[in-house]
Image (cartoon, grey):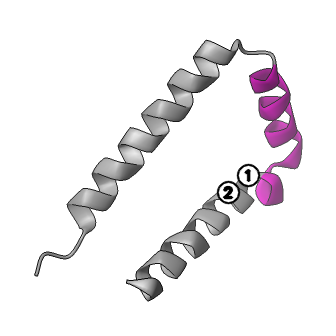
Amino acid sequence: MGNELWLAMGLVLVVEGLGPMLVPKKWRQMVSEMSLLPDATLRRIGGCLVIAGAVIAYMMWPSK
């Protein structure tokens, strides 16, 4: 299980790094606009991302 966790972390870092690497101005603008959103909206967005990630991980988890 350790290797899978490191693989997942590596993929998260790759995906997170694509925005600032490829379109830094747009990425900075998006982050700036997100900082103005109310806390409840950010929590909702974060919750949706966590649920989506958990569903994908569950679907992709190898069954034994």
Q: Residue furthest left?
A: 64
Q: What is the number of the mark on residue 16?
A: 2
Quarter residue 25 falls in: top right
- Callout 1, which amino acid? Gly
Quarter residue 38 falls in: top right
Q: As displayed, is residue 10 above or below residue 18?
A: below
Quarter residue 15 falls in: bottom right
Residue that badge 1 annotates: 19
Q: Specify start and end residues of the magenta stretch as a single range.
A: 20-35
State which mark lies toward you, 1 or 2. Answer: 2
Q: Residue furthest bottom?
A: 3
Is residue 60 shown in magenta?
A: no
Q: Main secondary structure of the magenta part?
A: helix
Secondary element under disc 1, as helix, strand or loop, is helix
Left or right relative to 17: residue 24: right
Q: Residue at x 25, y 58 (%)?
A: 58
Q: Are marks 1 and 2 in contact (CB under 8 Å)?
A: yes
Q: Residue at x 40, y 50 (%)?
A: 53
Disc 1/disc 2 C-alpha distance (Å): 7 Å
